[in-house]
Amino acid sequence: MIKDPEKYDLEPRTLRFSGGVLVFIKKLSKDIINTPLMSQLVRSATSIGANYCEANGASSKKDFHNKIYICKKECKETKYWLELLAQANPEHKEEGRKLWKEAQELTLIFSKIALTLEEDKKTK
């Protein structure tokens, strides 16, 4: 039996992650350095869940594959922006680190899904 089923349900998990990023961003000062980084982070972090929802409603296997790859790519980009914001805002580094760890877990999950899709494609 799975102890925490929501941990493995990626739609609510990615939604919670996006929400956490938004809460984090609201705590940062809007200055010449943070503003463009925050904008990029909002785009990439919220794109993860949106693309996963699209993958679940995909019209074909190819469409599903493409959306999963986008999820994986957006996770990696999100980690990049979180790292830069942590460097620019050391007082918020710990909260940024927690978000980075979740982005890393999501990256690993989407990487595994993508790898499985590739392996399935090769065996057919």
Image: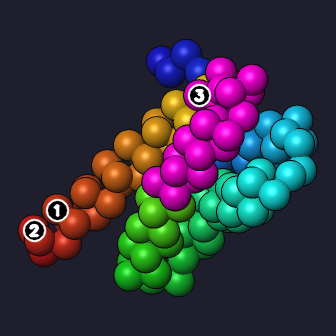
x, y percent for residue 81: 60, 51
Q: Camera-side residue: 99 or 58?
A: 99
Residue 97 in view: yes
The answer to if 51 sits in the magenta stretch is no
Q: Residue at x 61, y 37 (%)?
A: 87
Callout 3 environment at 10 Å: few (<14), some (14 to 19), or many (20+)? some
The answer to if 92 sits in the magenta stretch is yes
Residue 13 in view: no
x, y percent for residue 10: 58, 46
Left or right: 25 in relation to 18: right
The region drawn magenta spans 76-97
Q: Which residue is mark 3?
A: 97
Q: Residue at x 31, y 49 (%)?
A: 112
- Which amino acid, mark 2? Thr
SS class of the residue under badge 3? helix
Left or right: 121 in relation to 95: left
SS class of the residue under badge 2? helix
- Which amino acid, mark 3? Arg
x, y percent for residue 74: 53, 61
Counting the numbered discs, the total is 3
Which of the 4 image quarters holds residue 47? bottom right
The disc label shown at residue 119, or none: 1
- Which amino acid, mark 1? Glu
- Residue contact at pointers 2 and 1, CB within 8 angstroms: yes
- Give the main secondary structure of the magenta stretch: helix
Q: CA distance from mark 2 to mark 1?
A: 6 Å
Quarter in which the C terminus is drawn: bottom left
